[in-house]
Amino acid sequence: MPKPEPGPLHLRRIDDSRNMRRFYMLSVQPTLFGGASLIRNWGRIGTNGQAMIQTFDDSAKADEAFGRLESSKRRRGYLAP
């Protein structure tokens, strides 16, 4: 049985003393050709921000990249709302 893909992850980093209000979103979506795409969206809260899509040959590699990015952002102070 295949492992379920991680759901969308929404993280925020708010620091009023530095006027910092950021968001970071991650999700894994299947592609039409059997692979998986890691979709990242980030920016200042209240804006559309920027987006990046990375494609992988299989979902295991996409899930691994998802986990690496999640732990990196949490180390930098991003928290779930």
Image: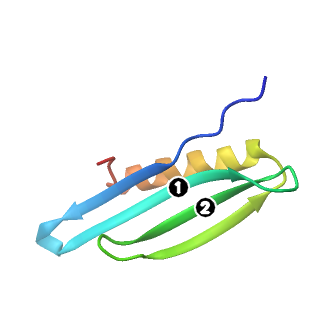
Please state if 36 lies on the left or on the right of 68 as rendered. right
Q: Which residue is identified by label 1? A: 26
Foreground residue among 48 and 77: 48
Mark 2 secondary-structure assignment: strand
Query: Vertical placement of 22 versus 1: above or below?
Result: below
Question: Is 49 positioned to the left or the right of 1 in the image?
Answer: left
Q: Are marks 1 and 2 in contact (CB under 8 Å)?
A: yes
Residue 59 location (% of width, % of height): 75, 45
Give whichever of discs 1 and 2 has the lower sequence position. 1
* 14 horizontally vs 31: left or right: left
Which amino acid type is marked by label 2? Ile
C-alpha gap between disc 1 and disc 2: 6 Å
Number of residues whose C-alpha sits closer than 10 Å to that of mark 1, classed few (under 14), some (14–19) or many (20 or more): many
Q: Position of residue 34 (x, y in %)?
A: 86, 49
Which amino acid lies under the numbered mark 1 shown in the image of this protein?
Leu
**Few, some or many residues within 10 Å of mark 2 (<14, 14–19, 20+):** some
The numbered mark at residue 39 is 2
